[in-house]
Image (tube, coloured by chain):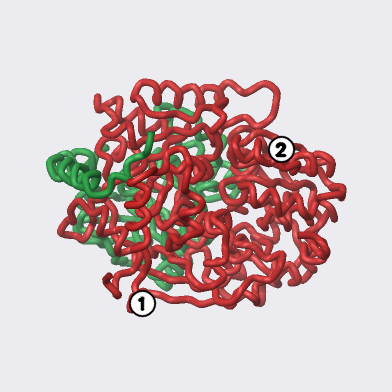
Amino acid sequence: MNLHSTLLDKLWDAHEVLRREDGTSLLWVDRHLVHEGSHHAFAKLKSRGMPVAQPALTFGVVDHYAPTRAGDVAADIRKMIRTLGENAAETGIRLFDLHDPEQGIVHVVGPEQGLTLPGLLINCGDSHTSTHGAFGALAFGVGATEVAHILATQTIWQKRPKSMRITFDGQCAAGVTAKDMALHWIAALGADGAQGYAVEYAGTAVAALSMEGRLTLCNLSIEGGARMGLVAPDDVTFDYIKGRPFAPTGAAWEAAVADWRMLRSGRESTFAREVIFDAKKIAPTVTWGTSPEEALPITAKVPVPDQLGGKADHARASLDYMGLTAGMPLTDVKVDQVFIGSCTNGRIEDLRMAAAVLRGRKAVVPGLISPGSAQVKKQAEDEGLAQVFTQAGLEWAASGCSMCVGMNGDLVDAGKRCASSTNRNFKGRQGRGARTHLMSPAMVAAAAVTGHLADVRPLLEGRT
Amino acid sequence: MSGWTQISGSAVALPDANIDTDQLIPARFMSQSRADGYGGFLLHDVREGTPGHPLNHHTPKVLVTGRNFGSGSSREAAVYALVDFGIRAVFAPSFGDIFAGNAVNNGLLAAQVDQATIETLLAHLGNGAEQAHVDLSTSRASIAGIEVRFALNPVHARKLINGWDDIDLTAQHADEINAFCAARHAAHSWAMPAT
């Protein structure tokens, strides 16, 4: 075993078909995931009269426009879903359609179905494709032109990013989750802090995370500027994969695990950048502004822009948009509604954490919960979590990208403030003029029962 | 896509940092057909809420802006909106990685320039529009009378100049790709989806 190669190097080298004189590699793509937004790429392929090169390695999922609530569906939304169905049928790719029992958000479905495996290269026309790196896969989002290129050739031109390791030593305290770890590092390094890098997450606090937690951590890599996040696979990974529908079986499984155990950075590996955090110092974290880097521990106060140096102008604009007063305690910020779901925090463990807070309590503001997949929905109903949510007064919906991006019509109204388990607090992200505060699902639940941003830790005392 | 080597036109400043893809094109416009043009969607909600916004008064070919431009989603529609508005070059201290890749695939120059130069340009441009000239062959630009050098990957330069499409370039490597595919699946049968 090469003691110097990083996990990134091993994955890259295993997929490199050739390298151009400028250093750009042509990489083989093991899995290509498409969704309704891929219509530009299918149109491009069709205009050139080209077939999909590898339909068996291409999978379609209805998620961005998936309606999550009963009622009429707008014509343009129906058209987006229908177009994906037509493109999938014409090109012979497996589609997880709207009413498929295995439908869900593409970054939830991939792992759930065993399509996401260690050692694979996975592309999707969605920036949160970094999620799949939690398995030790090389996974990154691409634009429509690149989607068309992958459909046509099953390859992608890409320059090898620099390597960066973010280590979380120690253990997170109770009530502190992978979401808090992610917001913590992004606040420390900036929304472009890892631009040009692939981030490998390491340390005892990462090893202690479930697959759901690792998926959340890698999902948010792009919010810190990194197109790829990675966690070296281990027994937690293998236990999660075994028996899933598209996962290898029998002799192929044994061969796979043997290969996968080699997927880790060597003891002598050097990274272009190393950053180390102490996990036990991380508190439940919320965003206060309009960039994920504008995040603070829940115990803090809304910052005073004049004290932020070069970021003062941005902070001033953020406070104006968010309708916040400099210096006010974050726990004084009242919310109008809550949302739990998305590719960041829409998995079963996320729903369990929210339910632990909500059980036997009432929400004092309205809220929507959209599970990450139809399978997660069923499991949550079987475990009694859905009942906890509805008894608390929250709406239990079907799965999809939903209120994270609002393409399906699940929107936050202008000027309304939403505590959200999603990934982007950008201006207008959840709807025109909507104000988004990002946090963990448990923290969203705490906001639901108190009506303001709140520290979840006291609410979890005596509960699991 | 047609290529270009030099452009002349006006430049305006958008001094904000972190102008993300959700601002560049709000999600609700993304089900529209490209054939109708995406230019009207560019920074739609920001412009509508800001009557004095430079893009409400000018139709520049060049933007000068703050760090982390185009961060966020992979939506290539953010680039379509810029290109359809008539913009051919954006100068910033840094760009979202996916945005930068999408830009070159659509004939848009994403020119990385150091923070100090950007601040000088922003100060000179203010709220107005000034003449600009960009030359890909020399990696130089003149904006509001200030000479600017930018870094440009030679392959990206050739793509912008020739309007090349990667699919054509890759087709030349079909034999190598097929051989790679066969070898990968022979050595690692688990890499194929089961069932």
Residue B130 in picture, x, y percent from top left: 41, 56
Q: Which chain is red?
A: A
Q: Which residue is mark 1?
A: A267
Image check: A208 left or right of A449? left
Q: Nearer the viewer, residue A123 or B50?
A: A123
Image check: B193 left or right of A327? left
Query: Mark 2–mark 1 contact, CB under 8 Å?
Result: no
* A173 over A52 or under it: above or below: below
The residue located at (62%, 57%) in the rendering is: A290
Amino acid at dot 1: Arg
The residue located at (39%, 59%) in the rendering is: B91
Q: Nearer the viewer, residue A325 or A164?
A: A164
Drawing shade for chain B: green
Q: Earlier in the sequence, mark 2 or mark 1?
A: 1
Q: Nearer the viewer, residue A221 or A47?
A: A221
* A393 over A442 or under it: above or below: above
* Helix, strand or loop status at disc 1: loop
Residue B111 figure quarter: bottom left
Residue B186 figure quarter: top left
Q: Which residue is mark 2?
A: A381
- Categorize mark 1 by other alpha carbons within 10 Å: few (<14), some (14-19), many (20+): few
